[in-house]
Image (cartoon, rainbow, N blue to C red):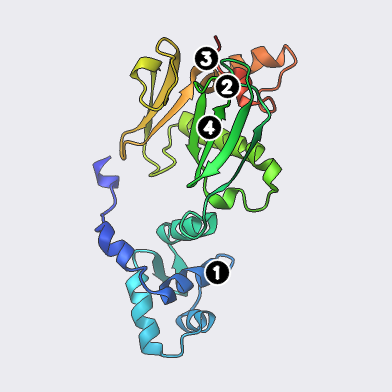
Amino acid sequence: MDDATPESTDPADAFAALSDPARVAILRALWETDSRDLSFSELRAAVGVDDSGRFNYHVGKLTDRFVRKTEDGYRLRLAGIRVLGAIFSGVVTEDGSVEPLPFEEPCPLCDGPMTFSYENEYVSVTCDDCDRFSMRYPVPPGVFTPYDRAELPRIAESYARSMLARADDGFCSICEGHLVPALLPGSETTDLGEWELDDVPFVVYTCERCGQRLTSDLGVALLSRPLVAGFFYDRGVDVRDAPLLSFVAAHE
């Protein structure tokens, strides 16, 4: 609805407001209040800025973009929370790479061994034998922080499931825009690398706002459907626990 569309701010101006470390510290201090509004003096004490005028200048740069001024003081806006989320996830502060390790599931095309790798914030699973199967998707570094290296493939799959669930619900993981699914053959899908799967159906989710695309094998995309999940459950398979690759439709 047109009357529900919020006023927009120039993105360059919005990000320029985060250019001083004190302003990021203000966002962190408001996050750590357990949703309680902080008065100007409380917020200044939490950040540790002695000069009241200087601190007022920094708060002013954040107000109405990342911080909301209330009767009781200041609180984070959703934009401020999202900025902190990017910091906490590691996408702007950590290096997203680990050494490759063996992947437990065999290649769905040739049953050969596969390798899991994480480099430049992208997970890749590739076949060591046929070089025809590959799977690649972004994962924020912070997702892997609490886990041992051997657990990373399992955690990456859980994250992939969450991405597919959001896509299936119609939400873009980049901009929260509306995703539109389309059933396409491999020949019309640009995200498949070296796969030779021209006649295999894939589901491509495309964001109407930012253009982001997420491609899923049809067999995996259908797992959220009650009839499909029920079919497997009646045969002793819980689709929530079984590896995603066991449902890939792209078998020879």
Q: Is residue 220 above or below residue 176?
A: above
Residue annotated with mark 3: 250
Q: Considering only order in the chain, which callout, 2 or 4, is on the residue closer to the N terminus? A: 2
The amino acid pointed to by label 4 is Ala
Per the image, label 3 sits on a secondary structure element best described as loop
Q: Within 10 angstroms of label 1, few (less than 14), some, or many (20 or more) residues?
A: some
Q: Considering only order in the chain, which callout, 1 or 4, is on the residue closer to the N terminus? A: 1
Residue annotated with mark 1: 36
Q: CA distance from mark 3 to mark 2?
A: 17 Å
Q: CA distance from mark 1 to mark 3?
A: 52 Å
Q: Is residue 23 above or below residue 111?
A: below
- Tag shown at residue 102: none
**Are circles 4 and 2 on residues that touch, CB within 8 Å?**
no
Measured from the top left, where is residue 110 in percent x and y?
59, 15
The amino acid pointed to by label 2 is Asp
Measured from the top left, where is residue 95 in percent x and y?
52, 55
**Are circles 1 and 3 on residues that touch, CB within 8 Å?**
no
Looking at the picture, tell me which residue is in the foreground, 111 or 130.
130
Per the image, label 1 sits on a secondary structure element best described as loop
Q: Within 10 angstroms of label 3, few (less than 14), some, or many (20 or more) residues?
A: some
Residue furthest to the bottom in view is 51
Measured from the top left, where is residue 184 in percent x and y?
38, 16
Residue annotated with mark 4: 165
The amino acid pointed to by label 1 is Arg
Residue occupying the point 53% across, 32% down: 165
Task: Tell me the quarter of the image containing the N terminus.
Answer: top left
Residue annotated with mark 2: 129
Q: Within 10 angstroms of label 2, few (less than 14), some, or many (20 or more) residues?
A: few
